[in-house]
Image (tube, rainbow, N blue to C red):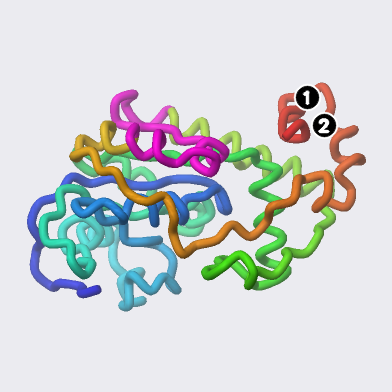
Amino acid sequence: MQLFSEIMPTAAPFVILGMPRTGTHYLEELLNLHPNVSSNGELLNPYDMNWPDNSRLLRSDRDLLELAYQYYPTRSGKTALTHVGCKINQPQFRERPGFFETLIGWPHLRAIFVRRNSLESLRSLVQARTSGQWLQYGTCHSLAVPPNVTLTIDECEAYFRIADDFHTLVANSFQRDRIMTIDYEDLLRDPAPCLDAIWFFLGTSPHACSVRTALRRQEMRPLRETVCNFVELKRHFSGGPHTSYFEA
C-alpha cells in the first residue's frame, strides 16, 4: 500500500460506522474484494497499519478527511478506483469531539452503518479486552476460544444507552438516500445479498466475489454460554426496551 502526497483521482466517498465489535472490519474486508472499491481502515486509530503516519492525527479534522478522500492510500492491483472510504467506530468520535460534525458535512458522503445486538457487541468487546485478541486470521483449527465474561448491570445499561444514542445520532444526521443500515446477523448469515445491496447503494458496478476472507469469527457460542451472569441480566432487563438482546 502506498500513501501519496499528491491529490488522487476523484472517487466517491463513503464511511463505515458502528459501535465496537459490530462487524465493521469484516464488512470492510468484503468491500475490498471489489476491484473498484477501497476502504482504508480506521482513520482515527493510531495503530491502524493502513495509515503509517501517526502524526496525521495532529492534523485538523478537515485535513484528516482530505487525507481519507483526496490523498488516500492505494492498494496493490487497484488502478481504477471509483469509491474510497474508511471506517470509524463510536468511541473514536468521543475521543475527537467535533469530528462527527465535520464528517457529515463532507460533500457527497455516503454512510454504511453496521448494527448488532448491543449485548453481543459488549460481550465481544470485554472478551477482546480480556484476551488481548482483537482480530484472528487463519484456519478455524487455530482459533483460541474467547474467555467467558461477567457483565455488570451498570455497564450494560451504560453501553446500551451509548449505543442507542449513537444509532439515533447517525440516523438523524444523514439524508435518507445517503445512509444504509446493515445488520451484522444478516452479513454473517448470508453476505452476498448484503454486498449486492451495498454495491447498488454506492452506485458502483455489481461484483460477484467470494465471501470468504482471511478474517475469522472468534466467538461461535451463544450469549447464554459466554456471559456468566446471563440469567441475572435477562431478568433485570426483561420487559424493557432491550429485552430482545437476550432472546438471540
- Asked whether 103 or 47 is in front, the reply is 47
Residue 87 x, y percent position in the rendering = 39, 53
**Does residue 140 appear in the picture of this structure?**
yes
Residue, disc 1: 240
Residue, disc 2: 237
Give the side of residue 241 with respect to residue 102, left or right. right
Residue 51's quadrant in the figure? bottom left
Taking the magenta stretch, the answer to whether it contains residue 116 is no
Give me the residue at 41% from left, 50% from top. Answer: 211
Give the side of residue 116 with respect to residue 211, left or right. right
Q: Amino acid at mark 2?
A: Phe
In the structure shown, which secondary structural element does the residue marked by tag 2 occupy?
helix
Q: Amino acid at mark 1?
A: Gly
Give the side of residue 61 with respect to residue 189, left or right. left
Binning the other alpha carbons within 10 Å of mark 2 as few (below 14), some (14 to 19) or many (20 upward) gives some
Q: Quadrant of the N terminus?
A: bottom left
Residue 45 x, y percent position in the rendering = 44, 66
Against 152, is 67 above or below?
Answer: below
Residue 137 x, y percent position in the rendering = 52, 69
Which residues, given as a range, are shown in magenta? Answer: 172-197
**Does residue 93 appear in the picture of this structure?**
no
Give me the residue at 22% from left, 62% from top. Answer: 67
Give me the residue at 49% from left, 41% from top. Answer: 187
- Asked whether 131 or 145 is in front, the reply is 145
Q: Quadrant of the C terminus?
A: top right
Looking at the magenta stretch, what is its main secondary structure?
helix
Give me the residue at 40% from left, 34% from top. Answer: 193
